[in-house]
Image (spheres, grey):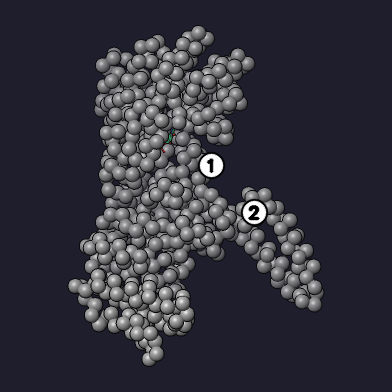
Amino acid sequence: MVETNGVGESVYGVDRWGMDLVSVMPNGDIGLKNPLIPDAVVTSLPDIVRNLGERGIQAPLLVRVASFLEQSIIGINRSFAAAIERSNYQGVYRGVFPIKVNQQAQVVQRIVDCGRQFAHGLEAGSKPELAIALAHHLAKDAMIICNGVKDADFIRLAILSLKLGFNTVIVLESPKELDTVLQVVKETGQEPLLGVRVKLTNQISGNWAKSSGDRSTFGMHTDQLVSVIDRLKDEGLLHCLKLQHSHLGSQIPDVNDVRRAVGEAARYFVELTQEGVPLTHLDLGGGLGIDYTGEKAANENSINYSMAEYCTNVVDTVSFVLNEAEITHPTLVTESGRAVVGSSAMLIFNVLETTLYDAKSAPEPEADDHHLVSELAKIPDYLSLERLQESLNDASFYRTELRAFFRRGYIGLREMARAERIYLHVMAKIKELAPAIGVDPVIDEQLEKLVDIYHCNFSLFQSLPDTWAIDQLHPVAPLQRLNEQPDRRAVLSDITCDSDGKIDKFILANGVSPSLPIHSLDDDTPYYVGVFFIGAYQETLGDLHNLFGDTNIATIELRKEGGFDLLHEQEGDTVSEVLSYVEYDPRDCIDAFRQMVDRTASDSLTAADRKQLISAYRAIISGPTYYA
Ligand SMILES: Cc1ncc(COP(=O)(O)O)c(C=O)c1O
């Protein structure tokens, strides 16, 4: 085994994507560092996982780091404050966290607590999210922005909450929504705080391009805006319209798209103000992205700007457009979700077993084996770099032919097994000789079909739904042995019975690859893999495919001197819980099983069998859904 320092960086590119939160320690462990304490000691993530395991919090496991979340909240508020000061902007910044991006109570509470000093508020896109927002003690100046489709109940609670001192803004998504607002205003006798959602025509690039531009679902066109303004004027309520909302998009890869969209939003602000709308707030929605790949490039999983640059561009653009029109600078609102919570959570799972597509040794062909078996076994005799492609072609041809003979009954099971094993051995020889990935794309493509499958203890659909649905990339790396050259390449398959349940795109130091360099397993030591920066959207978008439920969750804080404190623990779903989600009463299931056992003739089941059967069933019901 070759000792190689720096594999974490040279192979996995941890330094590129780690955001200074995740790094590789000299002993080859992935380490985490508290970003709020400049000289904090790095803590080994495998040690954290082992320690949590000893406390009964086993993998698969979602680890949330409190200071990673706090750093983002502090970061965005300070970056806007700095940009505002630099460009002599006259308004202030008020961030709101969109609850939909992570509704977990632990997360929202921490954002509210840490955000209080900045009057960071919340965005609600539904009645349940409004209920969450109003259950928090927000700072006096913090805002609650209500987006999305709203019925009278939603609007009534939003309006009435003003009486409690909340700054709850109802953002009108359509002229029709105004009818409901007017009806509730009449009924309650309370004036609302209103916003209006303006549909920008600028189309951004990236994965969420469809959430911007003419065909985006939400927001009003110019003629609808005019009709809303006129209606509010007629009703004597135009003075309630204080906020213009223009959602820029999500994970915007290119900062110039941000500039263009902000410029358009600011132009609307000017026009609406000149129409006599007394706007005081400009809300630019989401869009600030995360550099998942660390490439600093304008592509779907990366961004070509920093948080500071985003803030500067927003402030400068609004300032420029409004100065030209001599309009007072509004309070700037953004609804950054991904950039606030994305980096704060990681999924950790153990490898359960491997399917290898090569073999270190192989049997000799037997005397009466088909001659193609011997031809297959002779490939290593002429294998060389020059004849690599020819060797691959031959191996593929002989195996395909032999499989066809097997299907037709010309060769038997043991001969076929010998042939398969010889083929895998030839592949091992080819892989040893082949140039590093990236040198010859044709060879790479063929060898990628021969990478191992590492079977891992997680559900892609539950824990990483965006990886499945929209090809979202998250950094993935082994948590240990990063001072050892990985000797295998693999895709990571989950434990659902679904062939889609696998990760087969990985961010590596030299680009995105269809396989992950990984180590041969040592049977006695657990091998953990981490998927990083999954704090945004994944937890609630995840589903119960195969009834794999939520994993265990641990919220930790990293100590200055190394080590960690466990702030909160949330046990993963038990089988009993997931059964009840699909309307099975676990007690009824136990009863039904017990009756089946009782009905089975007593001469075929002893009392001990009966006890064993029922306790086996009960153990499943009360246990975790994942591999224990
Ligand atoms: C209205 C609105 N605000 C905020 C966001 C959050 O965006 P992001 O997570 O990119 O910050 C979204 C997401 O699409 C949104 O639709």
Q: Is residue 576 visible?
A: yes
Seen from the viewer's position, the closer of residues 374 and 139 is 374
Seen from the viewer's position, the closer of residues 90 and 228 is 228
Ligand 1 in which quarter = top left
**Circle on res. 618:** none
Q: Residue placed farthest to the left in the image?
A: 386
Name the quarter where the C terminus is drawn: bottom right
Q: What whole-number distance in Å separates the C-alpha atoms at marks 2 and 1?
A: 23 Å
Residue identifier under label 2? 579
Q: Residue at x 47, y 59 (%)?
A: 499
**Circle on res. 105:** 1
Which image quadrant is residue 384 in? bottom left
Residue type at numbered disc 1:
Ala
Q: Is mark 2 on a helix, strand or loop?
A: helix
Relative image position of residue 470 (x, y in whole percent): 41, 47
Relative image position of residue 433 (x, y in whole percent): 25, 73
Name the quarter where the N terminus is drawn: bottom left
Residue type at numbered disc 2:
Leu
Relative image position of residue 602 (x, y in whole percent): 80, 74
Relative image position of residue 19 (x, y in whole percent): 32, 48
